[in-house]
Structures are given as structure tokens and as C-alpha cells.
Image (spheres, rainbow, N blue to C red):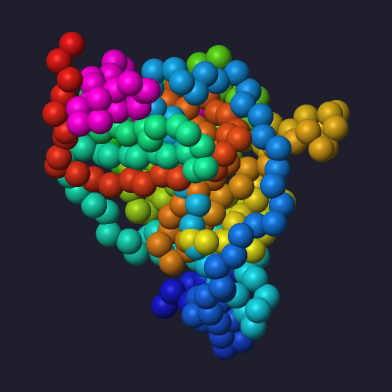
Amino acid sequence: MNDLEEIATLLGEPEPSAGAVARGRARLQQRARAGRAGRRLGWFVPGVALAAAGAVAAVVFATGAPTNGGAPATGKEVLLMAAVTAERTPEGSGTYWHVTRQWLGADHPSMESWTRRDGRRWTRDLPGDPADVVIPASGQTLSLKGAEVSFEELEGLPTDPEELKAWIVARKGEEADMSASEIRGDPTLTLLALITDLPTPAEVRSAAFRALAATPGVENMGPVEGGQRVRFPDPDSDPDSDPDSDQDIELVIDPDKARVVRANLILVDDGGMAFSAEFISVTTEWTDQLPPVKES
């Protein structure tokens, strides 16, 4: 089965028709002209000191989007296309998992971290840090649902979407470091962490994209620079509060690279989360290079 036939299957046609495959091909081949989203939301930052020690994990913002004769793909389709790509994307290798985060349109320094497989981390993320050195950081940087997670544990996660969600629901963490939705078993934020800045294996990333595609209310907001803008309802929404106070999660996803390239959500090292007043870009890579380390 080729990629287009698999997309058709994922969309509910076990025996994909020629029309379904044609629609998938049209969506993959037609790149929408890059544009900018017209609506700007108001943001809040709930209880997180962004200048605190420890780098923030962020999601990135991308370009163009697949369309079908000018009609954009649905949010579900964008995520499923990314899932197919992720499963076929070779994993990198290196000594350190290097993450760079940058607030866009704001006067903030970029934040960088280098994490070795044994969990040791170095950062360059605070105002005043020398530009040419990094500093050792205490503790491990990888966290899911309010608990530390190792490289080995990430590599052993389920590759079936339903099994992955069940693992997330069963995972125990510190409630003080978890959102309300995570405490009640909603997997959305954990799945988002798996597709953004964590060194998640290809098949696990694919499973996370597929699981997110089943999120009720996920929408495609249209093409923007770098990819497709996808919106998820706020998983921590209070049904008794004013709907206008909800803060939906917005990502820009490039389905051809299976990458989130920008977002309005910050996932913090201790497992917490916050919304940002500015979009944040993030790049991730394996590297064998660690800048000079600042002497303590």
C-alpha cells in the first residue's frame, strides 16, 4: 500500500477508491500559497515563571498546506498525513538531543538545551548567559504528565494509537505538575509533547499523530507560512465558565515533514504548561557537538 492509499484507509476506506486516492494525491501535491492567519487571540500565562531556570519546551510554526481544488484538508486529514510521513522518516543519531526555542516578535533570548541519553543536560537559556558557553543543569529535562521520562522509556512506548493513549492514562505523575485535563486522564497534552520537542521514535510519533487526529473538535484553520494551522479545543476548558475565556491550542504542522513548526503552547520541563503571548518556534536535532561548558 502506498502513502496515498494508506491515508484513504485511515480516513475510513479499507479498500480505498480511486476517488479517495485522487483526493489524497490532490491534497499532497497542491501547496497553498503561504499566508498569515487573520485573527489574533488573547493569551494568558497561568502560574509559570517563564524566566525561571530550565528551558521551556515549545511547539513550532510552519508553511503551506495541502488542498483539494482550493478547499483545505480537514484537521484530521492534516494529522493523518503527518502520521504517514512520520512513520517513514528515518530517525537521526547523535550524542545530544539539541532543542532551540525562540519567541517570535518578542525581545527574549533564545533558549537551548543539550540532553545526553543518560539524562544529563546543559542549557543556554537565561538572560546574561555568555553566548559562547553552556551551563550544566540539574535534574533530567524529559518529562511527561508530571513525571520524568527516559530516552529508553520513550523508545519503548506503544506504537498503536489506542495503546499509546491507554499508557498515558495509566501513567502516574505529580499532580502539582499536571494540568486538570492530565489529572482526569485526557491524553492531549502528553500527545502534543510527543510530537514537538521530545526525541520520540518515528513509529511512536506516528501513533501520537493518529491519536490526535481523533480529538473531538480538531479544526484546520488554513494555510500559513510553513504549513497548516491546526486548532485543538482547550482540554482544560471549564464547561461552567465563559467560552470566550477558553484558550484553544494552535499548532502549525508541515504534514510533508511530520513536524510541528510553531505553536501558542509552552510545555514546561517540570510537566506544567502555559499559553504564550507570542508564538514560539522550535528546532530539534541530534548532534555530537556540545559548546564549551561554563565553569561553576
The verdict on residue 56 being magenta is no
Q: Nearer the viewer, residue 240 or 288?
A: 288
Instruction: Specify the quadrant of the image occupied by residue 223.
Output: bottom right
Residue occupying image coordinates x 50% and y 48% = 262
Farthest-out residue, bottom = 18
Q: Position of residue 264 (x, y in %)?
A: 58, 41
Count of all numbered marks drawn on residues in the image = 0
x and y, in percent, of residue 272 in the image: 52, 24
Position of residue 275 in the picture relative to residue 42 (left or right): left
Q: From where the camera sits, is residue 119 visible? A: no
Is residue 32 visible from the viewing direction of this image?
Answer: yes
The residue located at (29%, 23%) in the rendering is 129
Q: Is residue 81 left or right of residue 112?
A: right
Q: Is residue 135 magenta?
A: yes
284 left or right, relative to 7: left
Q: Residue at x 21, y 37 (%)?
A: 96
Look at 19% across and 44% down and name the residue there: 287
Examine the image and state in which quarter residue 128 appears. top left
Residue 190 is situated, as x and y percent measured from the top left of the image, at: 51, 36
Left or right: 171, with 221 as reference point: left
Q: Main secondary structure of the magenta part?
A: loop
Tell me the magenta residue range: 124-145
Reply above or below: 39 against 2: above
- Please provide percent x and percent y for residue 73: 63, 69
Of 124 and 156, which appears nearest the observer?
124
Q: Quadrant of the C terminus?
A: top left
Q: Which quadrant is the N terminus positioned in?
A: bottom left
Q: Is residue 23 above or below residue 123?
A: below
